[in-house]
Amino acid sequence: MRNLLFLPLLALATCQSASNQKTDAATQTAACPPPPAPFTVRHPAWMHDATIYQVNVRQYTPEGTFKAFEQHLPRLQQMGVKVLWLMPINPIGTLKRKGTLGSAYSVYDYRAVNPQLGTLDDLQHLVKEAHAHGFYVILDWVANHTSWDNPLTRQHPDWYTRNAQGNFQPPVADWQDVIDLDYSKPGLRRYMNETMAYWVKTADIDGYRCDVAGLVPTDFWDATRAELEKIKPVFMLAEWDELHDPPFLKRGEFTPNTHLLEKAFDATYALRLHGLLDSLGRGQKPTRELARYYAAERRMYPAGVQLMTFTSSHDINAWDGSEYERLGPNAQPMAVLTALLPGVPLIYSGQEAALKKRLRFFDKDTIEWNNYPLQNFYTKLVQLKKQHPALHNYDGCAEFRLLPGPDKTVMFERRKGDAAVLVAVNLGAQPQVVHLPATSTSPKPAQQWAAVFADGPQAASNSEGLSATLPPHGYQVWQQFAKK
């Protein structure tokens, strides 16, 4: 048995009554003080219970258009996801293009819509319909580089970095279809800032996912966030993780920018956690490594600061493989962990279809939906995230404990007052017995643990209390609330 690890996100003694907090419709109202300065980002109120859904418009339907994707809004609304992240919607460069369609991250024109996806009217209609269904929409933004034939190369060639020979250069050796922008140029900063504001005003989008955000100066993002907030409350997601260098970086090749979560971004990627969970799922590391990870995360960030958790994305699916290729029978247990561990969860297009193939990155490759075999599975996780107060985002007063258990199991509790969620997964090939903690540690009695997945293992009472037997690669989630 491992030693019990207790990792409170913030000591409960510092919490304040929710009734003592001022209400601000633009920002989250929490029962705790916000993180200390310099962490001054004001998270939108609608993010407190949100799960993000990444939309690969090109591959989503045979048509690959905004109009065709729009037909899926009612289904995704029923699932409960709240934020729709659209991959880049801009035209793609043709010079040095990879594949037949090119990379969506090779931007030809920042102020136009890729005609293969639709028109500006189509995008505006999609955002309007998404808002009517209760979604918020963020665009994928590629600020670090452009295509080789972007008109900016002719209009403002000084906005680009140069190699020793004085020529345009890719930001990373493998990215031969794009060239690097130079953020020491004030004109470039003004242009990019104004263009990001343009899409908020013109298409009424609700924020951005920012590609390789750590390769762009942090003070640019800080200033841009402040300008966007003058228009409306926005959500900003950075593709970065200050706990882990992204895999495309070579030591000494860059000096990555840091402090992204202080003034500019609501979340960055939990890249280091993703790599660890993949290793756990493949049996390459012991589950006790999770305790080491969360200790490092708490040293880096104060309570209430969260990263985005995930098992897949467009990059991971295309270059590392689907979760079934990487994790095999532990794909669903890992989905349970990433949905319910502290953080803002992400679902990638096709995960509810149990997508088992790598989608081609530079060519058309439509998702095979197969009647959505995991729709109910993800719906249960997303709805629990929305409804249970112990799982809400950016709550510095909620508690998180990793619990002891047999080898190859992960078990944790998340608690807010007398409401709690207990998660247990078995990553091994043998059944494992896990013991459930007491139902309440406060004077107010709590209900017994209630299983979330009816077809999963159930708790049984014995002389030692409650326990459950997890089958190989099995999982269960229990919840409880105070008795009325």
Image (cartoon, helix red, strand yellow):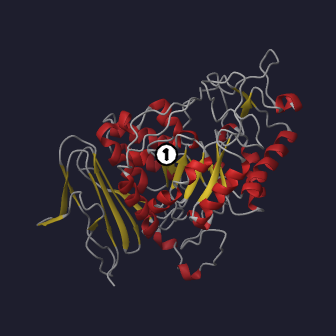
Residue 13 at x, y percent in the picture: 48, 73
Q: Quadrant of the C terminus?
A: bottom left
Hey, which residue is sitting farthest top in the picture?
165
Position of residue 399 relative to residue 212, above or below, is below
Q: How crowded is mark 1: few (under 14 residues within 10 Å), some or many (20 or more)?
A: many
Q: Name the residue under label 1.
A: 349
User: Residue farthest to the bottom?
Assistant: 484
**Could you say which is closer to the camera, residue 33 or residue 473?**
473
Q: Is residue 335 above or below residue 467?
A: above
Q: In the image, what residue type sits under mark 1? A: Ser
* Residue drawn at point x = 79 percent, y = 47 percent: 195
In percent of width and height, residue 383 lies at: 42, 63
Q: Report which quarter residue 79 is drawn in.
A: bottom left
- From the viewer's perspective, is 357 left or right of 233? left
- Viewer-proximal residue among 248 and 371: 371
278 w.r.t. 219: above or below: above
